[in-house]
Image (cartoon, helix red, strand yellow):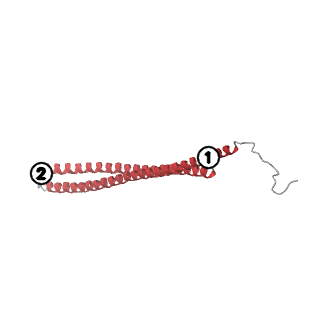
Amino acid sequence: AISAGDPIVDLADNDPERLTRLEGKLEAAFARRESYQNRVRAYEDRVEAIQRAQRAEVMAAEAERDIAAQNLQAKRELLAAAEAEVTTADRQQDRVRGLAAGGLASTRDGELAELSATSANASIAARRAEVRAAEGTLASKRASLQRTIAQVQADLRVAHASLDSARIEDVAQ
């Protein structure tokens, strides 16, 4: 007869290594978890590094654009000065012609006034070419800045996607 407290079944472990295997699986799971966490931290560091580098790239591109804009402004000011020089040279040439017609200016004075006007007109043409070149440079720098910004945004999206993927894998484990 069986009385209260008597064992009715005697369980024996058929696999004495089972506990060791389970402990090994648990350690492996912890190691995988740590590996995923390290991967997440590495991606976070990478995103931060990319952001810092790209801020520097954008700032450099902005500086190049600003320098080109300043150069254009300087070229426009030189053009304005050349235009004023043409106006002055034309007026001087007209005065010398009027004086020469009255016999009050020499042929040499007329030649010098004409040379001055011709030189001023050549200078204005050169200044206009410089302004067009500076406008082209500024347009190029603006486009370069836009390309840099677009590349920065694309690189950041890729880095954030990698980080998000690593976080999802970490949570899934």
Secondary structure under tag 1 reads helix
Q: Are marks 1 and 2 in contact (CB under 8 Å)?
A: no
Q: Amino acid at mark 1?
A: Glu
User: Circle 1 is placed at which residue position?
Assistant: 27
User: Circle 2 is placed at which residue position?
Assistant: 106
Farthest right residue?
1
Give x and y (percent) for residue 12: 76, 45
The residue located at (81%, 56%) in the rendering is: 5
Closest to the camera, between mark 1 and mark 2, is 1
Q: Is residue 69 left or right of residue 103?
A: right
One can see residue 61 in this view: yes
For the residue pair 155 and 120, the one nearer the viewer reads as 155
Give the mark count: 2
Give x and y (percent) for residue 37: 56, 50
Q: Residues within 10 Å of mark 2 (few under 14, many from 20)?
A: some
Give x and y (percent) for residue 69: 35, 54
One can see residue 142 in this view: no
The residue located at (27%, 54%) in the rendering is: 78
For the residue pair 23 and 25, the one nearer the viewer reads as 23
The residue located at (32%, 52%) in the rendering is: 71
Q: Residues within 10 Å of mark 1 (few under 14, many from 20)?
A: few
Q: Which mark is residue 121?
A: none
Q: Amino acid at mark 2?
A: Ser
Label whose residue precedes the other's in the sequence (1 or 2): 1
The residue located at (16%, 51%) in the rendering is: 110
